[in-house]
Image (cartoon, grey):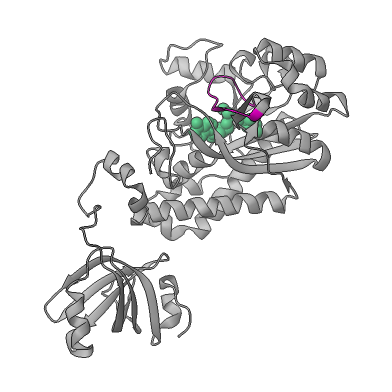
Amino acid sequence: MADFQINMAANFVGKMVKVMGWIRHIRSSGSIYFIEVRDGYGEIQCVVVKSEVEERLFKECAELKLESSLVVEGLLREEKRAPGGYEIFVKDIQIINIPDEEYPISKKSHGIDFLMEHRHLWLRSKRQWAILRIRSELERILREYFYKKDFVLIDTPILTGSIGESAGNLFETDYFDLGKAYLAQTGQLYLEAAASSFKKVFCFGPTFRAEKSKTRRHLTEFWMLEAEVAFYDTNDNMDLQEDMISYVIDEVLRSRKNELKILERDIKKLEAIKPPFPRISYDEAIEILKKKGFSIEWGDDIGGDEETAISTNFSKPVFIYNYPGTIKAFYMKPNPEDDRTVLCDDMLAPEGYGEIIGGSQRDDDYNSLIKRIEDFGLDPDKYDWYLDLRKYGSVPHSGFGLGLERLVSWVCGLQHVRESIAFPRLINRIYP
Ligand code: 4AD
Ligand code: MG
């Protein structure tokens, strides 16, 4: 018997197949059992007819419950009335495990706290299956994109000695005799070093922020795709982000149609994601927000609600560029045309999803950078190595970070990032 996965059913019509999986649903009508089995790739109806199997087997079927695990052997055939259009006419079943207790997650609706507490089981539900298959695919496409563009992958450290982003939300730990170490908020500073060796680099790994805020966009541990390119200015940087997002959306629409359908995602909205994306300055963003009735002044940060308000103005992602330097990170290059602002961009996803990417041109001037490090209350001694990059062959360079969970949430149309990662880490959750 050839290796079989349920998603390959079309190629196995008329053949004997073996499915190893779990019971999603079971019902009987006296002399027949209909068992819906999922195998990780799909689900298929398995029909057990009393007159066609051993008596022992038919009796055992009465014991089967939701999420029992089993191996089913039978004839695969087309059946228009079955969900998916195929079914297995069962010859034999090997029961692996029957739960002693009722499976905690039933068809009835459960509260979010209950589901989060049972995340380890919730992952088996169809919706979570679809989301995490899309996530896996997005990661694959992102890596593919950067390799195709001749970027080199640099795995940046998770334990770091210098603060990468800001002092506000660090996880710290004692590091032997060397003082404090921090869990990385970003791989960026290390990517900047690597960019002067390889020109185009990226990293893709977990990053950590002790976010005090409980929002639908914040995790304390999230995955970030970061890219850094030597000789790129802020406009090249935005072009790259636009090209990457367009590519990713295009590819995922092709390869994860079925999963997007399960999520009832309105894919027309995603199909509209084609370059160019609108680009508005921070100044323009403030004007838009004032017109919408927000009490916001030049110099204020643009928060989640404001981002939502702006992004609903556009059907594509929108860039907001050149924020005031005081509300952005220390490493950004001051704007030569207005030194109150820095050369940076945030990309906001449409449909109210808000910031998915933060990027900037980096300060490549030694004296300016050391001043900014001090202005931000950071210890310049910890940045000797980073400052060296401005001493030896400093070049204009730019990069960005894409939050994977924010991307997944947008693509899948989720209400909250907690569903976009298998085991979310939130301010109030470390279990399971
Ligand atoms: O804008 P951020 O803080 O930028 C950086 O960390 C830069 N060092 C990146 C770079 O230039 N190499 O974070 C980048 C992205 C955000 O746009 C957002 O999508 C995501 O990371 N992000 C979070 N996602 C989930 N939970 C959090 N707490 C997040 N903080 C940032
Ligand atoms: Mg940001």
Q: Specify the quadrant that holds the N terminus.
A: bottom left
Position of residue 68 measured from the top left corner of the image (x, y, whole percent): 28, 66
- Image height check: is 201 above or below 399? below
Q: Specify the quadrant that holds the C terminus.
A: top left
Any part of residue 410 in sight: yes
- Image height check: is 258 above or below 248? below
- Image height check: is 152 above or below 82? above
Q: Nearer the viewer, residue 240 or 66?
A: 66
- Image height check: is 72 above or below 114? below
Residue under the point 54% across and 19% down: 168
Q: Is residue 392 highlighted in magenta? A: no
Q: Nearer the viewer, residue 18 or 10?
A: 18
Which residue appears farthest toward the front when viewing the image? 177
Q: Main secondary structure of the magenta part?
A: loop
In the displayed structure image, the side of residue 10 where residue 122 appears, left or right: left
Displayed-image quarter of ligand 2: top right
Residue under the point 70% across and 12% down: 374
Bounds of the magenta span? 164-176
In the displayed structure image, the side of residue 28 where residue 135 appears, left or right: right
Q: How many marks?
A: 0
Position of residue 386 measured from the top left corner of the image (x, y, whole percent): 76, 26
In the displayed structure image, the side of residue 244 where residue 101 appears, left or right: left
Q: Quadrant of residue 260 in the image?
A: bottom left
Residue under the point 41% across and 76% down: 9
In the displayed structure image, the side of residue 127 where residue 190 appears, left or right: right
Which residue appears farthest toward the right when viewing the image? 393
Position of residue 169 measured from the top left corner of the image (x, y, whole percent): 53, 23
